Image (spheres, rainbow, N blue to C red):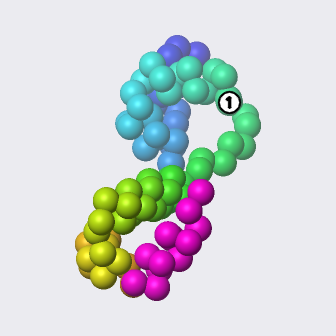
Amino acid sequence: MTDKSVLDALSGEFKKVAALIGDELTLVLCDRFGGLSIPVPRLAGFHRNQRDDIIRAEFDNGTKVRDLARKHRLTARRIYGILKAKP
């Protein structure tokens, strides 16, 4: 089977992956992980941690909780929770 025929045989969600990462990386992915079921993590937790770090830094620099809540579209209670859970 040629590389082109492998790419043509893709269907469903994996065809979307191929469109996103390109033909060469798709073939590498198939070669290394073909047949495995690999969960793809969501980045929501990562983004939330980044946001929380930014909120803590802004608070440490003097930004008021009310202003942080407005800026990040959170409640003041949630801001206090983030500040309390300081790592």
Quadrant into which the N terminus falls: top right
Count neighbours of disc 1 (C-alpha within 10 A) and say few if under 14, some if 14 to 19, many if 20 or more.
few
The residue lying furthest to the top in this view is 2
Residue 44 place in picture, x, y as percent: 49, 59
Callout 1, which amino acid? Gly
Q: Main secondary structure of the magenta part?
A: helix
The residue lying furthest to the right in this view is 36
- Per the image, is 77 magenta? yes
Residue 70 is drawn in which quadrant? bottom left
Residue 27 place in picture, x, y as percent: 53, 22
46 is higher (above) or lower (below) than 75: above
For image coordinates 38% across by 36% down, the residue present is: 19
Q: Secondary structure at mark 1?
A: loop
Residue 23 is drawn in which quadrant? top left
In this view, the residue in front, 30 or 72, is 72
Horizontal side of 10 relative to 62 (left or right) equals right
Horizontal side of 41 relative to 70 (left or right) equals right
In this view, the residue in front, 48 or 80, is 80
50 is higher (above) or lower (below) than 80: above
Q: Which contiguous range is marked in magenta?
A: 76-87
- Per the image, is 14 magenta? no
Residue 30 place in picture, x, y as percent: 61, 27
Q: Which residue is mark 1?
A: 34
For image coordinates 30% across by 75% down, the residue present is: 64
Q: Can residue 47 be seen in the rendering of this structure?
A: no
Q: Can residue 76 be seen in the rendering of this structure?
A: yes
For image coordinates 51% across by 53% down, the residue present is: 46
48 is higher (above) or lower (below) than 81: above
In this view, the residue in front, 47 or 14, is 47
